[in-house]
Amino acid sequence: MAETITRKEQRLEDTWNVAFMFANEADWEVELKSFREDLAGLSQYEGKLGSSAETLAEAFTLKLALERRLEHLFVYASMRADEDTSDAHFQDLDMRAMSAYNEYLDKVSYMEPEILSIGEEQVRGWIGENATLKSYERALELILREAPHTLSKEQEALLAQAGEVVQTASTAYNLLNNADMRFEPVEHKGETIHITNSTFVPLQMSEDRELREKVYNSFYRSYREHENTIASLFQSNLKASRFLSRARKFPSNRAMYLFNSNVPEELYDNLIETVHENLPAMHRYVSLRKQLLGVDELHFHDVYASLVKDYQAKYSFDEAKAMVLEAVKPLGEDYSKIVKGAFNDRWMDIYPNKGKRSGAYSSGSYDSLPYMLLNYTSELNDVFTLIHEMGHSVHSYLTHKHQPYVTGDYKIFVAEVASTCNEALLTHYLLQTTTDKEARKFILNHYMDSFKSTLYRQTMFAEFERIVHAKVEAGDSLTAPVLNDIYKKLNEEYFGPDMIVDDNIALEWARIPHFYRPFYVYQYATGFSAAIALSRRILEEGEPAVRDYLNFLSSGSAQDPIDTLRLAGVDMTQKEPVAAALEIFSSLIDEMEELVQAD
């Protein structure tokens, strides 16, 4: 295996063009100093926002301008820190940007309560008569929408002071899970295998079943040893959510967490109900997995193992670029030109180097390129990661191009749609152009696993959250045995009769950090479903569907996320998009079964 290179050894053309943001670090320092000086100007408007439409317009204009500059400063520092996490200089830059962010939050904290104190009628009247406020109408509408859930100044101050206390359970869990939790190493074939949270899943992907089982048992043994502590922390976090939802006059925890994106609770319930109606397809997949792995009993230490063992193709980055460009052709020439520009203008940081942040992401400010961090190693999964992040970046590019800053972002509810739609188009392209049987199996396996892990598993997580939050709201106690029982029954229901549901997997809830960010994970399943439905419409209908889709990508946060998706031709308040996606899942199973039978 080749030794990982240092940051200085990276070729310039393989790195992102940070000079587009600041020509050099000295320019960043100048801008940070100027930002801090101008930030003081916000104070002059405190207590005066209600004096006139002109005063409110001036204050809000300054707020947005400062926010925009801060975003640019912050993204630059964060990206430089991610290039080499061992470089103390850029870590310091990142911390200074965070300090500036906290200063900004403190300076603007008076604005929303003060705007609400003006009164909805007066603010709407000013919007109608002042052109500047009219251009901020969407942002002001979102503030006014908070009025029923905003308390008096004194009560808001008290809630703010309680913030750290409310976060205590989440903070303690993260420290336990990421810093203090220890997993006993396993001995295997004369080698000591060390286990961490970050290595667990890669080890579960090993072709060596005996190793997978040893690692699985050791991993969950540690959670078993801490299950009562984790259950107490989890229940405390649920109670903290209940405290906040009651304080802010929401009927339930779920209503509070769905409020920000204006998502109806019926959508959440429809997702779970539609997936339940399609559990037979998941059970077929589990049965096929058991068959292809050739095991008498299928266990949860088998769920990450590849069903295709003999396919080892590698793709250079140039080959990956060509594949991406072919895959996005159905999105039209305009979209393809943007993708070509991304490759030519150094939107991405391509290869691993020592100290570089792991994984991949798309990031940027309103005024920067929509950058991509990659760690490309020539696997097919890396090609999918490239086109996934490209989807995010083109989404950001089109949003910034067509929307003013005030609506130049988008909610997490729609964020995964563009990336997953691109992945679906790549899968379609590969299946259309690949005749090698083992290669087709590999691609089908990759796509089926996406459905399993994103649509089914995240919906199971969402159902678990619905159950446990309801129990806390009803005053029930959630001990470790109660949580284990709920989670085990859900696994039995979702995975079906061909899966051995053991007492270890009953503890999986204890290792999922997303549960400390309540009612978040359902968005992965809805976003995935919307993307699959949209990719099918694009491939079947062509130009009209592409036009609607590009309109969606260009819409930012000008509307609520559900309304934005309707622009693309998908109504997530209905069951059809999820059902349509699951039809495709069934067709993948059909083809894999046919290929296996032909062997």
Image (spheres, rainbow, N blue to C red):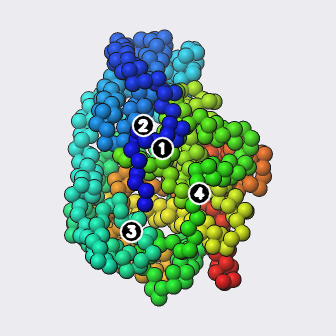
| Mark nearer the viewer, 1 or 4 | 4
- How far apart are labels 2 and 3 at the CA level? 29 Å
**Observer-nearest of 38 and 387:** 387
- The residue that label 1 is drawn on is 373
Image quarter in which the N terminus is found: bottom left
Ranked by sequence position, the earlier of labels 2 and 4 is 2
Amino acid at dot 3: Leu
Instruction: Check disc 3: other Cα within 10 Å, few if <14, some if 14-19, many if 20+.
Output: many
Vertical arrangement, residue 273 with respect to residue 389, above or below: below
- Relative side of 505 to 449, left or right: left
**Observer-nearest of 455 and 383:** 383
- How far apart are labels 1 and 4 at the CA level? 18 Å
Q: Are marks 1 and 2 in contact (CB under 8 Å)?
A: yes
Check disc 3 and report its element: helix, strand or loop.
helix
Instruction: Check disc 1: other Cα within 10 Å, few if <14, some if 14-19, many if 20+.
Output: many
- How far apart are labels 1 and 3 at the CA level? 24 Å
What residue is drawn where x is 49% and y is 40%? 11
Amino acid at dot 4: Tyr
- The residue that label 2 is drawn on is 79
Ranked by sequence position, the earlier of labels 1 and 4 is 4
